Image (spheres, rainbow, N blue to C red):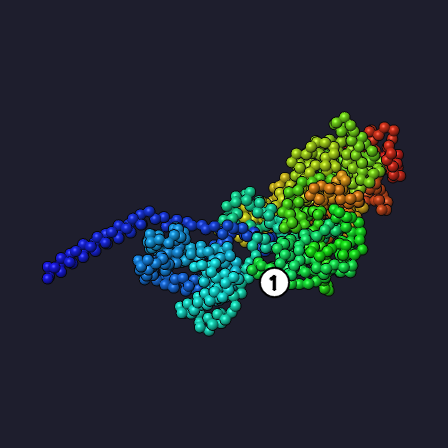
Amino acid sequence: MIRLLGYFFAIGAVFFLVVAGGFAWYIEKMGSDLPDYQVLAAYEPPVTTRVHAADGSLMAEYARQRRLFLPIQAVPDLVKNAFLSAEDKNFYQHPGVDIEGVARAVMVLAKGGRMQGASTITQQVAKNFLLTNERTFDRKIKEAILSLRIEQAYSKDKILELYLNEIYLGLGAYGVAAAALAYFDKSVNELTIEEAAYLAALPKAPENYNPFRDTDRAIERRNWVIDQMTANDIISAEAASEAQDKPLEVHPRPTGTYLASSEYFTEDVRREVIQRYGVDALYEGGLSVRTTLDPELQAEARKALQHGLIEYDQARGWRGPVTRVEIGSDWGQPLAKIEPLADVPEWRLAVVLTADAGRVEIGVQPPLDISGARGAERELATIATDDMKWALRLDLPERTGSVNSAAEVLSRGDVVYVEKKEEGDGYRLRQPPKIQGALVAMEPKTGRVVAMVGGFSFAQSEFNRASQAYRQPGSSFKPFVYAAALDNGYTPSSVVMDAPISLPDGNGGVWEPSNYGGGSAGPSTLRLGIEKSRNLMTIRLAKDMGMDLVAEYAERFGIYDNLGKYLPMALGAGETTVLRMVSAYSVIANGGRSLEPSLIDRVQDRYGKTIYKHDQRICQGCDAATYDGQPEPELVDERDQVLDPMTAYQITSMMEGVVQRGTATRVAELGVPIAGKTGTTNEEKDVWFVGFTPDLVTGVFLGYDNPTPMGRGATGGGMAAPVFIDFMEDALKGVPPVEFKVPEGMDLIAVNRKTGMLSSGSGGDVIMEAFKPGTGPSDTFSIIGADEMAGGFGSGEVSQEAEQAIVQGAGGGGLF
């Protein structure tokens, strides 16, 4: 019997050794080709890039996986303990594997069941980072082996850090930091017990606990996590009960652009970041981009431009509804399917229910709720005829002219835009304008773009007319022709002939330019020429100094890359952008220093290291540890001087005259020192105004995307300047007026602005003109272009002052 027992023992021992050996061989085989767990030490997860305004406001986030990486030290204990209670309460005690859980999973598999979980947080890290999601016994063994190795190589805190930043928690959010923002629009430090518990309930299957679709299941799971937190002595029973009684108050953070009105600006920033660092850096690199945008100025810029576009568009009349729908028993259903202009939230879509002579009854589209769906409520409202008077003028393909009744404008089933009235009940009828435009505001000393609007609505058209639309600037280009002249021997009192001129057009014919509105004034000073925007004078001036020089200055200012050396180009016939024009005017406004326009102040990588900074000026003395009587720190500006500072002041003074006496006198109502220039192209297809104070340059353009005449009388002074005024009124509010600084060494001499002659008296035509040292009103008279006038001054009328100047001699020193 004993021998028999020994025999069986020997057989059992051999069997055990064989099984153990086989198991050891299997484990060795499973562990031989495992991924290298050491890569976790250098793991850099894809992280969200965030774009901020100058004041820190969040503008946009870009990510393939919405994730914000948080070091474990920055994760609150409440959040850590919520996840540990829900996922792995023994995390800080086990070696990486839950032995009981693994045994239980093996038994279930042996009985023919599905492979179960029972994974520790370490195992989930091994699976999520290094393995696949397949449910097999081999994968489970590999996961266990890797977990044991990971536990030996890394601290528990490091493993938990990887886990909390990697897990997917629904709503496109990866990691606890992104999830806190996605669900509650909060940082992790602001989460309450019930909010932390809900996030901790999500890792297993976030789609099963959707807060909108599966609210009851989500609350049940959240409350289970709260119970676990209580059982683990994380929170008290009283706190748990209070948290469980609270509703699931989810407030999703919007995706895309967060700062209203900044869509055009944000999209240009996105393109620039991609150009600098590539697509992967934008969507995975976790960059922090601080832009130059001033949110308050941006909002005012958008409002001013939209108001100007709407005003012009409504004056043209009603072009018809957005679309038409069939109205059945519920008008809300077909209306809900139509997407409104998302970035014009004050406008809402509505469907016409009835229309008679006195008013229109409408059904208004419900706004979006927090889940992104449209509410079910039905709002009935009215549009009074007084609130749609502009639409009584029709501009329809089949009918034009005026009508007297709202019923002739709208009919049942028409889908239109409406805007709630500021006071009282009812809505106003609105229409997305067909005309477009752009506005750019820039700090002239730095080139920082503080506001940029590229059209009426980004949702309507993503094309940025501020930076992408190349249009003719018209007369707003003239200051650079005059600046070239002033920089090369001419003075503001130089006299040019304003009279008809005929020039070969290069095709065997002649080109005969004319002044806007016709007529001519004979000999006139450069100042008068720019104030009144004289085309004939500008052509003669450009011809006299040569288009080579004009082209050189245009390219030096960055307006054009390669300007054609043809005389029509002196009148702004070349094409450029609003951003380029504002940058060029900024060079004049800052005293002639070159600048690089910038939408971005600084870019930092995911670790906070600055990898780009726009301001490259050197600060001498800024690194002093203490003050010991040394001179104050000084910023050294090494930018090129592309224009003589004295020339810059002269052309600025002349453009002040445009506002005070010339084509933009309505801008003077702002009541502060402002210089600027209007621009209107042939057939009124483009209208411009670019103006500036010493600290802010703003350019406005209006025109159709497909260049179309806007009608006789559409000018830069009449259309673009009012938008400029509207914006600058708000931009300058509370800002003390600042005079333009006269460069040291310049001579201010009283002259008659019409003749350029020295004046000792006073009167409306006497001004203090700025002259460079060695120049001034001359006592010899010379008229640029006079030699072209066979038989006198042609049909141009010569002013009495000009005749006196011819007889007595007047300014124009150095122009021979």
Name the residue nearer the viewer: 401 or 665: 401
Q: In the image, residue 680 lies at what x, y percent?
A: 75, 42
User: Which residue reaches farthest bottom?
Assistant: 238
Name the residue nearer the viewer: 425 or 96: 425
Q: Which residue carries the number 1 mark?
A: 376
Give the total of numbered labels.
1
Name the residue nearer the viewer: 89 or 777: 89
**Quadrant in the rendering for residue 80:** bottom left
Amino acid found under the numbered disc labelled 1:
Ala
**Quadrant in the rendering for residue 347:** bottom right
Name the residue nearer the viewer: 606 or 331: 331
Residue depicted at x 80% and y 42%:
532
Q: Give the vertical position of 690 relative to 55 (above or below).
A: above
Determine crowd level at label 1: few under 14, some 14-19, many 20+ residues with C-alpha closer than 10 A: some
Residue depicted at x 84% and y 37%:
520
Q: In the image, residue 220 lies at what x, y percent?
A: 46, 67
Q: In the image, residue 411 lies at what x, y percent?
A: 73, 56
User: Which residue reaches farthest top?
Assistant: 508
Q: Give the vertical position of 263 relative to 566 (above or below).
A: below
Dot 1: what SS? loop
